[in-house]
Amino acid sequence: MNSPRLLGLLLVLGLPVLAWGSMPQQTLAQLTLGADRVVLARVVDQRVNVPQGNVKQMTTISQLEVLEEYRGRGPRALELVQLGGRSGLWESHLAGDAKLAAGETALMFLRCPDPKAAAQCVLVGLAAGKQTVTAGEGGRREVEVPAQVKGGPIRRPLDEVLEEIRRATPPPVQQERGKR
């Protein structure tokens, strides 16, 4: 990707973040409707990609293993692409983006924009699109809903969050037999 094109991409993605404090919080329904896939995934590994040694074009690629799918279908192994990363003495991150660590499990709201590369996705809503899942009381899984989501920050049972996601997911289109 050439520099002017990357700069344009950064501006398009970064301008809304400049007004982060004045941006309204998103609801789980808004995140769900903006996502191609909503999954429970484990971060397997991460690597930083520095095209031709140019740190201004640095991206972090997180390898995800899909454990459960709640909306959309696709490959069980995904790559989550985020702008920025750390390479040597250089470090850059998109303000308001989620931080991921190898080994963690999270509920993720993903957009996979290229049908030819369905295994390459980005987070919907930056930090709002990644919600850490942990074991709670009595072994129930809990979601750490971040401050960028309306009603957060708060810990909620995963079952309750999934029910809200199901309510936000439109039913599949019904087609009468023989009609197009």
Image (spheres, helix red, strand yellow):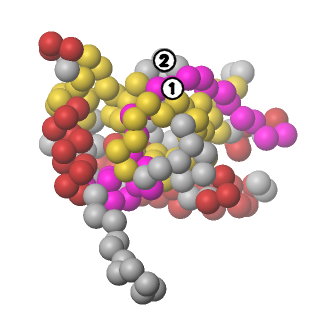
Q: Which residues are magenta?
A: 28-52
Label 2 residue SS: loop
Label 1 residue SS: strand
Residue 118 in picture, x, y percent from top left:
60, 51
The answer to whether the residues at label 2 and label 1 have Cβ atoms under 8 Å apart is: yes
Q: Residue furthest top?
A: 138
Crowdedness near tag 2: few (<14), some (14–19) or many (≥20) residues, C-alpha within 10 Å: few
Residue 13 in picture, x, y percent from top left:
51, 55
Question: Would residue 45 be found to the left or right of residue 24 on screen?
Answer: right
**Residue at x 29%, y 20% (from the top left corner):** 134
Where 30 sits versus 129, above or below?
Answer: below
**Residue at x 44%, y 30% (from the top left corner):** 67
Residue 125 drawn in magenta: no
Residue position marked by numbered label 2 in the rendering:
103
Q: Look at label 1 and name its amino acid.
A: Val
Please identify the quarter of the rendering in which residue 61 is found: top right
Mark drawn on residue 43: 1
> Closer to the N terminus: mark 2 or mark 1?
1
Where 135 sits versus 158, above or below?
Answer: above
Q: Nearer the viewer, residue 36 or 13?
A: 36
Mark drawn on residue 106: none
**Residue at x 24%, y 51% (from the top left corner):** 166
Please indicate, yes or no, whether residue 45 appears anywhere in the rendered image. Answer: yes
Quarter of the image with the N terminus is: bottom right
**Residue at x 25%, y 49% (from the top left corner):** 165
Instruction: Give the number of callouts.
Output: 2
